[in-house]
């Protein structure tokens, strides 16, 4: 594949060389002819005057031929240079530089009102690469480009942006509706083997979503990300205020941890007899500008960055100190702390947890770590080692949001899982929703068979409490018992509740 590029460079170099040589020959000839003409004018050439004049005519003829030849070489040189700079060497599709050039050209036309583009990202190119090799990935890109050319049946331009991304540029002022298009069949043949490819598309529009080619590429890529978040194949870019705020917040997060703006509220969890068994620590950001922010505005972003390890260290330090104070005040409950999969992947996570417990004179069994199903799915060695080490010492694990993630019952066999927390979406409308009743009933029975207890979260009414008790749920958490509250209020609440 690289051969094509090498040949292209060879051609460009030799064309450039010929242009130089011809120009030099031409210049030398011009010099000689001028000299002859000069001598003729001065009358210094008496003999062979005619021959000299023929020479001059001959030269003019040669010169025309040379100019024509240079012209040919020049146009070849230009088209090869263009191919070199604006074409992807492996798929022969126009590249991102070509997109920027074309976009600038089109946008400067007078009759343009809008221009749509769609970024098509493949999501399984790594698997295809692993099985069939890189050439199959390029083959797939070419096939996808052909596929869209055939599907859309209009004059579109398709650019290769990246190893996993193509950009479709629609003609100016062309209204296109993706929902009206038939769904891609997503099968191509590589070496006669049918291969399934997954794509996600993000659409954006000039000038509504951006003025420059790079801005629009960024917007289309955001739309692709949004499509992935929403598990759909297609998403149209929307400017979200929230997105820019999230980026600003992410930048301030490290400082917020250092200056203790991140605080925790506590929500009690009770057993079926009504005794408080534990409380869950829920993060809040007491932001000087935006007020009290919920975890949804910063936790997910935080988990994507290196700040995650500071956060878990801070959370353990903050919450276990509060737990120690609670124990000293005569309340012997456990504390449930939310952790992320990134935390479990840390090398010395278990050691860090045990050190924090030790420093606060707490037993491992005073601590529950809550992790979503996704975390338990991760089968890497570090995660398993951390879970095993901690559960052997007596720390409990809860699987959070059970039922909405990538439920795999096999995960329930892992050591150290004390409870599953049935997601609030099954609990909130339990009394009216028969499907949810059946599901909760089934989950409770299954957990009982496996010797795992169940926590119902999002319990909002007295009726649900009764219904859940009848179904055999072991623990209850939700607004019907108490809302999450700051630590100072927790003391008073516990005292009042126990009386
Ligand atoms: P989660 O672990 O499922 O926490 C329960 C969420 O449900 C909390 O939302 C809580 O305020 C809310 N909730 C409790 N009772 C009810 C109820 O009766 N009805 C309704 N509708 N909601 C109820 P919150 O505090 O906004 O936390 C959201 C999520 O953020 C948590 O979900 C947890 O996954 C995550 N999170 C919170 N703190 C941390 C943290 O320190 N670290 C990590 N990694 N994640 C955290
Ligand atoms: Ca939780
Ligand atoms: Ca939950």
Image (cartoon, grey):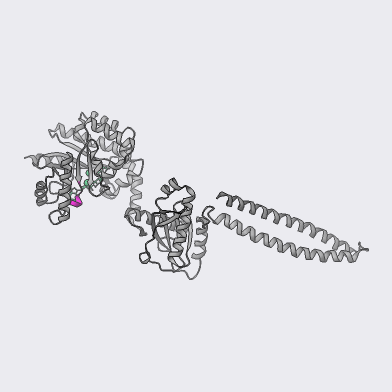
Residue stretch in magenta: 422-427
Magenta stretch secondary structure, dominant: helix
> At x 38% / y 54%, what residue is drawn?
198
In the image, is 203 to the left or to the right of 274? right
Asked if residue 129 lies in the magenta stretch, the reply is no
Q: Position of residue 164 (x, y in %)?
A: 44, 52
Say which quadrant the C terminus sits in.
top left
Q: Name the foreground residue: 439 vs 81.
A: 439
Q: Position of residue 271 (x, y in %)?
A: 12, 41
Q: Name the foreground residue: 12 vs 450.
A: 450
> At x 22% / y 46%, what residue is drawn?
402
Snapshot quadrant of residue 447: top left
Give above or below for 82 relative to 394.
below
Snapshot quadrant of residue 360: top left
Direction right: furthest residue: 47
**One can see residue 140 in this view:** yes
Q: Position of residue 335 (x, y in %)?
A: 19, 37
**One can see residue 487 in this view:** no
Direction left: furthest residue: 499
Direction bottom: furthest residue: 111
In the image, is 233 to the left or to the right of 470? right
Asked if residue 423 lies in the magenta stretch, the reply is yes
Give above or below for 182 relative to 89.
below
In the image, is 110 to the left or to the right of 478? right
In the image, is 80 to the left or to the right of 277? right
Give above or below for 116 relative to 7.
below
Snapshot quadrant of residue 307: top left
Q: Position of residue 434 (x, y in %)?
A: 15, 56
> At x 14% / y 46%, what residue is drawn?
482
């Amino acid at each position: 594949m690289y051969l094509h590029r090498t040949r292209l460079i060879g051609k460009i170099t030799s064309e450039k060389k010929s242009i130089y040589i011809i120009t030099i020959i031409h210049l030398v000839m011009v010099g000689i002819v001028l000299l002859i003409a000069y001598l003729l004018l001065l009358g210094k050439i008496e003999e062979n005057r005619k021959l000299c004049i023929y020479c001059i005519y001959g030269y003019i003829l040669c010169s025309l031929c040379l100019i024509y030849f240079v012209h040919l070489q020049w146009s070849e040189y230009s088209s090869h240079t263009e191919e070199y700079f604006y074409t992807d060497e492996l798929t022969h599709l126009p590249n991102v530089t070509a997109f920027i050039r074309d976009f600038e050209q089109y946008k400067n036309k007078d009759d343009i009102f809008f221009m749509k583009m769609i970024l098509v990202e493949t999501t399984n190119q790594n698997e295809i690469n692993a099985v069939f090799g890189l050439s199959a990935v390029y083959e797939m890109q070419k096939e996808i480009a052909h596929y869209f050319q055939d599907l859309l049946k209009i004059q579109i331009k398709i650019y290769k942006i990246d190893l996993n991304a193509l950009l479709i540029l629609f003609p100016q002022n062309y209204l296109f509706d993706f929902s009206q298009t038939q769904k891609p069949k997503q099968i191509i043949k590589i070496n006669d083997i049918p291969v399934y490819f997954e794509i996600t598309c993000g659409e954006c529009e000039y000038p509504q979503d951006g003025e420059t080619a790079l801005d629009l590429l960024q917007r289309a890529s955001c739309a692709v990300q949004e499509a992935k978040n929403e598990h759909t194949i297609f998403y149209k870019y929307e400017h979200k205020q929230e997105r820019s705020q999230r980026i600003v917040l992410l930048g301030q997060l490290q400082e917020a941890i250092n200056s203790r703006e991140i605080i925790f509220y506590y929500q009690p969890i009770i057993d079926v007899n009504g005794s408080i068994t534990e409380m869950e620590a829920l993060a809040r950001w007491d932001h000087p500008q935006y007020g009290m922010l919920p975890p949804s505005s910063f936790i997910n972003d935080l988990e994507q960055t290196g700040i995650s390890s500071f956060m878990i260290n801070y959370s353990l330090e903050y919450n276990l100190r509060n737990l120690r104070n609670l124990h000293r005040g005569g309340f012997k409950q456990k504390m449930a702390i939310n952790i992320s999969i990134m935390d479990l992947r840390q090398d010395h996570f278990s050691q860090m947890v045990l050190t924090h417990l030790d420093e606060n004179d707490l037993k491992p069994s005073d601590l529950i770590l809550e992790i979503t199903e996704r975390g338990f799915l991760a089968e890497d060695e570090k995660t398993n080692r951390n879970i095993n080490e901690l559960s052997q010492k007596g720390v409990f694990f809860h699987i959070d949001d059970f039922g909405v993630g990538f439920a795999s019952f096999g995960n329930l066999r892992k050591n150290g899982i004390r409870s599953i927390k049935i997601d609030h979406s099954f609990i909130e409308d339990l009394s009216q929703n028969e499907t949810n009743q059946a599901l909760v009933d089934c989950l409770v029975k299954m957990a009982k068979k496996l010797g795992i207890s169940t926590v119902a979260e999002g319990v909002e009414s007295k009726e649900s409490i009764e219904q859940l008790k009848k179904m055999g749920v072991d623990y209850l958490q939700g607004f019907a018992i108490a809302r999450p509250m700051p630590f100072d209020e927790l003391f008073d609440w516990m005292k009042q509740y126990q009386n």
